[in-house]
Image (cartoon, rainbow, N blue to C red):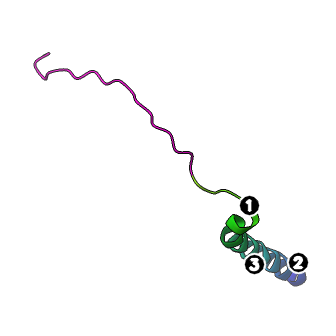
Amino acid sequence: MGRLFRLLIVLIVLAAIAFVGYAYLGPILGADFSAPQEEIRVPVTLQSGNDS
């Protein structure tokens, strides 16, 4: 049981290192992490506070 727990911890640590490495090296390797840039216009109807 101890070996299984140790293996699980090692796999989690390796996955975390791979995740951080991909975050740093992704743009160099061609991955684009930027959010899409587009303008969104939504009409808004304003009402006065005298409806009561």
Q: Residue at x 76, y 73 (%)?
A: 18
Q: Earlier in the sequence, mark 2 or mark 3?
A: 2
Mark 1 packing: few (<14 Cα in 10 Å), some, or many (20+)?
few
Q: Quadrant of residue 26?
A: bottom right
Give left or right: position of 40 versus 25.
Answer: left
x%, y% of residue 34? Answer: 58, 55
Mark 3 packing: few (<14 Cα in 10 Å), some, or many (20+)?
few
Relative to 41, residue 21 above or below: below
Q: Residue at x 77, y 72 (%)?
A: 15
Residue behind mark 3: 13
Report the quarter where the C terminus lies. top left
Q: How far apart in space, not on screen, are marks 2 and 3 (Cα)?
A: 14 Å
- Looking at the rendered structure, the secondary structure element under dot 1 is loop
Residue at the farthest top position: 51
Residue behind mark 2: 4
Q: How far apart in space, not on screen, are marks 3 and 1 (Cα)?
A: 25 Å
Of discs 2 and 3, which sits in the foreground?
3
Give left or right: position of 41 versus 10.
Answer: left
Instruction: Magenta stretch: give its range.
Output: 35-52
At label 2, the amino acid type is: Leu
Of discs 2 and 1, which sits in the foreground?
1
Q: Residue at x 72, y 74 (%)?
A: 21
x%, y% of residue 29? Answer: 76, 66
